[in-house]
Amino acid sequence: MPQLRLALAQVNACVGDLAGNAELVVRWTRKAVEAGAHLAVFPEMVLTGYPVEDLALRESFAQASKEALDGLAARLAEEGCGDIAVFVGYLDRDAGGVRNAAAVLHGGQVVARQFKHHLPNYGVFDERRYFASGDSLDVVRVHGVEVGMVICEDLWQDGGPIAALGEAGVDLVVSPNASPYERKKDDARLALVTRRAAEAKAPLAYVNLIGGQDELVFDGDSMVVTADGALVTRAPQFVEHLVVLDLDLPGGAARAEGVVGEFTVHRRTLSERPLPRYEPLPVPQPAEPLPDEAEVWYALVTGLRDYVHKNGFRSVVLGLSGGIDSAVVAALAVDALGADAVHGVSMPSNYSSEHSKSDAADLAQRTGLHYSVQPIADMVGVFVDQLGLTGLAEENVQARCRGVTLMGLSNQHGHLVLATGNKTELAVGYSTIYGDAVGGFAPIKDVLKTLVWDLARWRNAEAEKLGELPPIPENSITKPPSAELRPGQVDTDSLPDYELLDSVLDDYVEGDKGYRDLIAMGFTHELVDKVLRMVDRAEYKRRQYPPGTKITFKAFGRDRRLPITSGWREG
Amino acid sequence: MPQLRLALAQVNACVGDLAGNAELVVRWTRKAVEAGAHLAVFPEMVLTGYPVEDLALRESFAQASKEALDGLAARLAEEGCGDIAVFVGYLDRDAGGVRNAAAVLHGGQVVARQFKHHLPNYGVFDERRYFASGDSLDVVRVHGVEVGMVICEDLWQDGGPIAALGEAGVDLVVSPNASPYERKKDDARLALVTRRAAEAKAPLAYVNLIGGQDELVFDGDSMVVTADGALVTRAPQFVEHLVVLDLDLPGGAARAEGVVGEFTVHRRTLSERPLPRYEPLPVPQPAEPLPDEAEVWYALVTGLRDYVHKNGFRSVVLGLSGGIDSAVVAALAVDALGADAVHGVSMPSNYSSEHSKSDAADLAQRTGLHYSVQPIADMVGVFVDQLGLTGLAEENVQARCRGVTLMGLSNQHGHLVLATGNKTELAVGYSTIYGDAVGGFAPIKDVLKTLVWDLARWRNAEAEKLGELPPIPENSITKPPSAELRPGQVDTDSLPDYELLDSVLDDYVEGDKGYRDLIAMGFTHELVDKVLRMVDRAEYKRRQYPPGTKITFKAFGRDRRLPITSGWREG
C-alpha cells in the first residue's frame, strides 16, 4: 500500500490580510516540510480569511487574491517547499462569477483548482450573495495516491462532490473548512466526517480554521477518519496546531475522468509512483473534545483576544460594578490578554452599595488588573439638574455618564472599551443604549445570564484545581443582581427569575417556538406575554449593540435579522 | 374586445402588522368597488409588509399570515367586495418551504395562489435565505379575460414566468411589487415593464408599495403599459393612490394548461363571459416622475415619517448646530411631521461661534419648530477635569455630552432623537460614536454632503416658488462647515474638499472601483490614499450608526456587509 505523510495546518487567518495570511501559509508549510510531510492542507479561504463578506464583490480584491496565490506558489518553491503538495483556500473570480476556491500548489505553480459547489445561505452564511457554484473536481495524484478535495459545505450536503468522488475513485479526500464554533453541536462533525469517508470510500482529512473573526470564532477540531469509520487523530480546539501523520492508502482507486453525475472530474499527476516504504511516525493521540463550560470559556477568550489584537489594540478598559457580568468579562480579558493589558474602572454613583465597590476592588486584586475609581456623582448631577431629569431618564443618565467616562479613557489612553452586557439583558432590552451598551466589543453578548454564573463557578473551580486564587469574588456570584440605578433596586423588580427567563428565551429565540408552543410547554401566559413583549420591543437596542463572540447559532447579531419597525406580536 | 376595469392599489403596509394590513386591503378594495372595478391588485406581500426578514423563519408567523389571508377573503365578501377579484401578496409555508406568495381572493375564498420563482439575493435582498422558489402559475379568467401574474423579481429576470405566460397565453398580466426607491434608476422600471409586456404579448399592470420600512423606502410609481409598449397611465410617487382605468383586452388568448417550459400552468375560471359593453372612464393622466432633488426630498420625508410613526413615536428632538446638516434634517422633520412635533436644541460649548447660535435660532423661527438652548460647558467641564482629557478625547466628550443631553430629553419627554450626520462624514468616520451619532434614526445618513447642500437650495427655492419663507438660513448654506470642537476648526483641516471627497466616495463605494481604477480616473495618489484609508477604517462606526433612509443602492447599512476586522487595504 502506498504511504503518504499528511500535515493538517489548523491556523488562524485574518480577513483581508493577504500578505499576512500568505506568510502564515509559508511558515506552517515549512513546519510541515521539516516534519517530512508530502501533502499539507490549510483551511477554507485561508489566504483571504473567512468570511470576507462584501469584499468578495470588489474586483480589485479578487484580483489581489489570485495574484497572492500565484505569488505564494512561487514563494513556497523559493523557500524549499516546492515538493510538497499544498492545498490552499482562496477567492477566485472568472467569467462565471466570484468563487470560493481551493488550489493545489506544487513546484512553484498552481497545479489544480476547485470551486465550492454547495453554497450555504442560512444562519451566519450568505454565500449565495457572493459566490457562483462550481461543478468540476480536480483530483491530484501524489506519490501514487489519488487525492480529491471537498470544500466545507460540500461535506454537509447529501449528494454532491463526495458522492461523485466516491464514484470516480479516490484514495484520500482532504477537506478545507471554515466552520464556526457552535455550542452543543453534539459532535456532529465527527459523525458527518465518518459518514462522508464511507461514501467516498477513502480516508477523509478535515481541516478547520481557528480564531476569532468579528462575531465568529472557529474552533479547529481538525481530524482524520478512515473509510471504515475509525477516528485516527484529532487536533485540540482553539489553538493553532499542525497534525502530522502517516497513512497507508490503497492506491488502487478507479481513475474515472470526465462527467460523473453533475460534475466534471479532472486528474492531474504530480508524482505517479508510490514512495519506497518508510517507517511511519507514531500516530498522534486524538485530543478529547472539551467539556461544555471549558469549550465556551475558550471560545470567548479566543474571540476576545483576536478581536482586540486583529483590530490593532493592545489593551482594554471596562467598568467594574462588583456584579457578576463585569467580573466574568474581566476574568475573560485577563485570560485573553494578560492582566497588564486590562484596565478596570469602578464608577460608583450615589446609589452604589458598599459591596459594589469592595467586590470590584477584590476582583482587581485577585486578577491583578489595573484598577481605578471614578465617581460619577458630579457628572450626573449637572445633567439631572440642568435638564430636570426624573425617573427612567435619571436612571439612564447614570449609565450614560459611565459610558462617556469609559470612552474618554479609551480616547485618552488608546484602550478598547469592553461592554459587559449578557445575552439575557440584551434579549429583553434591560440595558441602556449609549450607557452600559457602550463599547467596541461585548464578550458575553451571546451568553445567557444563568450560563454567566456557571462560567464563573467553572473558572473559579479550575483555578482551585491548579492551586491558583479563583479570579471571581464569591460575593459577586452569590449576591442578587442589581443595576443599582435607584435605591434598593434589584433585577427581579423588572425581570422574571433568571432561570425561568433564560428557559423561555432559549425556546423562543434559539428554538423558534411560537406563543402557543411555549404555553403548551408549560410556561404561564403571564410569563410568556411578558418575555415575548420585551424581546419583540428590544430589536433596536440589539442592533446598536457592539459585536461579541457567537457561541450559539441564533445569537443576537447579524445572523438574526429582524425588522426594527414591526407590528407583529406573538400570541 | 372584452373590457375590464382595473384598480391598482398603491398602498403603505407595515411589516408584521397582519391585522392592520388586512384592514388596509379592505379599505382600498372598498374604494375599488365603489369605482366599479372588476379586479384590484395590491403590492407584493402587502399582508405581511416587506421585507419580513427572519420573521419568515418563524412558523407561527407564516401560520398567522395564512390565517389572515383566509380571514381577509371572508371579510371582503362580508363587506360586499366578494365579486371583485383581489390580488393580495402574503407569506405562505407548505411542505416545500416558506414562500413569497400572491393569492387571488374572490367570493369569500382564496381561488388561486402563486409562489415567486426568481428570488433576489443581492443588495438589500436576501430572499434565498428565506424562500423556496415556486414553479407553478395560476391564471384566472375574469369576465372572459385570462389574467396571469408575476411577482416582482420574476419581472426583472430574463426567461421565467413572463416567457411562460407569453407562451401559454394570457390577455393581461398583473405584477405585485415591493421595489425600493433607488436614486437615478434612469426610469429602468418603465423600460422593463414595456419589454415584459411585449414578451407576454399582453398589457402589464405594475403595482408597487409606497412608504418607509426601516432603511428602505418604496416610491410606488405603479403603471400600466400595453403589449405594444404604450404607457397608459402612471401613479404619482410616495403617496398612497388608487389607479382606476378601463382596458379593452383581446380576450382571445390561447389557453394552454399543464407544463410550459419549467412551469406548470393552472387555469381557474372566476367568470367565463365578457361583460356587456360599457362606457369606459376617462384614462387618468400619467403622473410625471419627479425631478432628482424633489424625488430625494420626498424619499427622505417619507422614510422619516414612517420610521417615526410606525415605531409609535409622535415627536422628534435633534441638536441644532447652525450648520447645514442639522438645518436640512430639521426642515425634513418639519415637512414629515409638522413643526409642532419637532424639538430643536442648541447646545453651545465654549468653542461655539456666535453664528452657530444665531443661525440655529433663525432656522427655528423660519420653520416654527420648538426651540431651546442647553449649554454644555458645565457637563464637559466635569468630565475633562476629573478624567484629565486632552486633544481628541476632549473634542469627543463635547459631542458625547450633547448625545447624553438629547437622550435625556428623549427619555424625559418621549421624543425620538434624530442623528444629523451625512453619508460623507459616515463614510470617512468623521463623527463621534456615542456623540453626534446618537439617535434612533439618521435621516441623511445616505446623503453625500454635496447633495445636502443641493437639497437645501432646492427646498428653499421651492418655498420661494410658493411664496413661503425658505426654511433654511442662507448663512447655514454658505458658511464653511465646522464641527466647532476646538477653536477655529473647519472640516477641511481633516478632510479633502467636499466636491473631490464626494466624487471619490461615489466611485469607491457606489461604483466599487479599486485603487488603480481611481488613479486611472485622474484622482491623485495622495487623495485616493487618504480617502480609502479613512473609509476602510470607519467600518465599525458605520455599523454602530442608527438606520436612515436608503436613497442609493450601496448605502452604508445592512446592504453593505463588510468585516470590521480586516487586513485589506486597497493600493
Image (spheres, coloured by chain):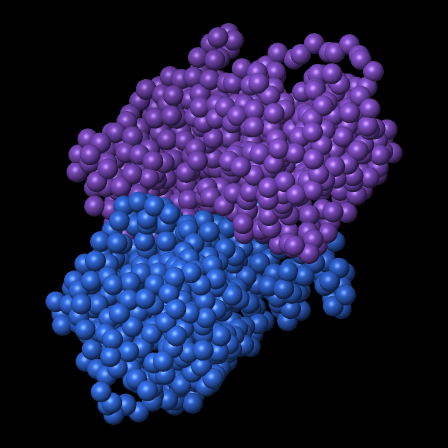
Chain colours: A purple, B blue
Which residue is rendered at x = 63% and y = 40% of the image?
A260
- Residue A78 vertical position relative to residue A201 in the rendered view, above or below: below
Image spot of residue A436 (x, y percent): 40, 40
Relative to B377, A111 lies left or right: right
Report which quarter residue B208 is drawn in: bottom left
Residue B46's spot in the image, x, y percent? 31, 63
- The structure residue drawn at horizontal position 30% and vertical position 45%, both measured from the top left corner, is B59
Camera-nearest residue between A43 and B269: B269
- Give the quadrant of the N terminus of chain B: bottom left
Counting from the top left corner in percent of width and height, residue A545 is at 44, 44
Q: Is residue A242 above or below residue B432?
A: above
Q: Is residue B147 visible?
A: yes
Q: Quadrant of residue B8?
A: bottom left
* Residue A412 visible in rendering: no
| Residue drawn at the location 42% of the way across and 38% of the way down | A555
Q: Is residue A568 above or below residue B318?
A: above
Task: Provide residue B333's location: percent of width, then percent of height.
Answer: 37, 69
State the residue in front, A119 or B341: A119
Q: How many marks?
A: 0
Q: Residue at x 72, y 58 (%)?
A: B515
Q: Quadrant of residue A146?
A: top right
In front of the other: B166 or A230:
B166
